Every structure is written in structure tokens, then in C-alpha cells.
Amino acid sequence: MRKEKNTKGWNEIKTNDSWALFKIMGEFVNGFEKMSQIGPCVSIFGSARTKPDNKYYKLAQKIAHTIVDHGYGVITGGGPGIMEAGNKGAHLGGGTSVGLNIVLPFEQHDNPYIDPDKSINFDYFFVRKVMFVKYSQGFVVMPGGFGTLDELFEAITLIQTKKIDKFPIILVGTEFWSGLMDWVKATLLDKFGNISPGDLDLIHIVDDETEVLAILDAFYKKYNLSPNF
């Protein structure tokens, strides 16, 4: 009985997984078609829980406004908090404002500052991550939680392993990021040798919008603006 039950269960899973491939492919096709038309953009990441009166919400809005003033578009995760601030700054600056929204049971909903034709919904985190990495010319990472850290270390890993082209990774907020980066250098690099010194060359910690723009512009004086793979 147990063997028959388990066999039936696994067969059902296999069938469901096979049909899920079509939905996954559809998300990739829809994402590639829309994102390939938006032009050079910078992604802004951060917590969905950050309120509009928080200093990092206000700073993310300033950063986004500055970015679009200098010809880049802005991509966010499409939700509230820092994501809303990024889209708001891009929208008020008259620039491209893209939202890659993910369907979640809490915290996530479209913010009103995304361009109507540039709001894309995803069911799968991994498809959404591909869009961020492929079409972003830089990551601006504001204070956030596990999701923000996930995006940050995914990008670092892909650059480290040369699966994608290099692009700037800019951490905003010395008070938030310095402890993590001190641990990365002291523990991962110096004590255990689990990374190489060059792995951290493209990571910068800054505190205002002018520093963000200076890093982006300096990088792209050397490299072309193009999809990352």
C-alpha cells in the first residue's frame, strides 16, 4: 500500500511539474519581450517594510530621481517600501519606471508609480531574478531583509563565477552595511579564504545619491551599456 501510494504521488508530481514548464516558459518569454525594449536601467533593491517617513525611503527616491536625470531608467521589485520609493523617484523625474512584481501572500502589491506598460507580474522568483540580472546596468542596494540579501549575493556570485558580465553593486547606508562587509572581509576573505580579494572590487558602500551616480558613470566610461548575458 505504501509503495503504491508513494508511486502515485510521485507520478502526480511529475505530471504537474511537466505542465508547470509551460507557465515558466511563458514568464520568461513575456519578461524578455518587455524588458528588451526598456533601455539601460539601474535596479534599486530594499525592504518592502520601509515607510515613507523613513530616511532610506526618502534617499531611495532621491537616488532614483538622480539616476533618471542622467539617462538611466529604474527597475524595482514593484512593491511597497523602498521599491515604491525607487519607482516614485523615477516617475517624478520623468524617467523609465519598471516594476517586476512577485505574487506573495503578504507585503507585496503593485505601487502606483510604475509605468503602466512596464509592470510585469511573476509567480516564480527565479524567473524574476533573471530579469533583474540580465537587464540591470547596476544594483543599488538599500537596507532590506532576506530578499534584498538574496538579490545581492546572487549578483555577486554570478559575477564571481563569470556567468554574467560585470556591473556595479552599490550598497547605500554605511551604518547598515558596514558590519556585513567587515564580516565578509575578516571571515570569508582573511580568515577562511573562501573568496578572493578581487571578488569585492565592484562592491561600494555609499551614503548619498551623488556617490551612486559617480560610480555608475565612472564604470560605464570603461564599459558599454548592454544586457549582461
Image: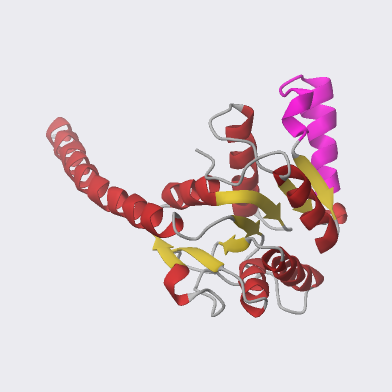
Would you say 65 lies left or right of 91 here?
A: right
Magenta residues, start to end: 177-201
Total marks drawn?
A: 0
Q: Nearer the viewer, residue 171 or 19?
A: 171
Location of the N terminus by quadrant is top left
| Percent position of residue 105, x then y | 45, 67
Residue 102 versus residue 189 in the image, above or below: below
Q: Quadrant of residue 201?
A: top right
The main secondary structure of the magenta stretch is: helix
Residue at figure coordinates x 42%, y 49% from the top left: 127
Quick one: 102 or 72, which is closer to the camera?
72
> From where the camera sits, is residue 6 visible?
yes
Q: Is residue 185 magenta?
A: yes
User: With respect to residue 13, does 53 lie above or below?
Assistant: below
Q: Is residue 160 left or right of residue 124?
A: right
Residue drawn at x 75%, y 51% is: 217
The quadrant in which residue 144 appears is bottom right
Residue at the extreme top of the image, as rendered: 193
Residue plotted at (45% across, 51% down): 125
| Magenta residue check for 200 | yes
Residue 208 appears in the picture as rendered: no
x and y, in percent, of residue 139 in the image:
66, 51
Residue 171, relative to residue 119: is it above or below? Answer: above
Identify the residue at image location x=44%, y=59%.
37
Above/below status of 161 relative to 30: above
Expressed as whole percent of the image width and height from the top left, the position of residue 21 reads 26, 45
Is residue 205 shown left or right of residue 74? right
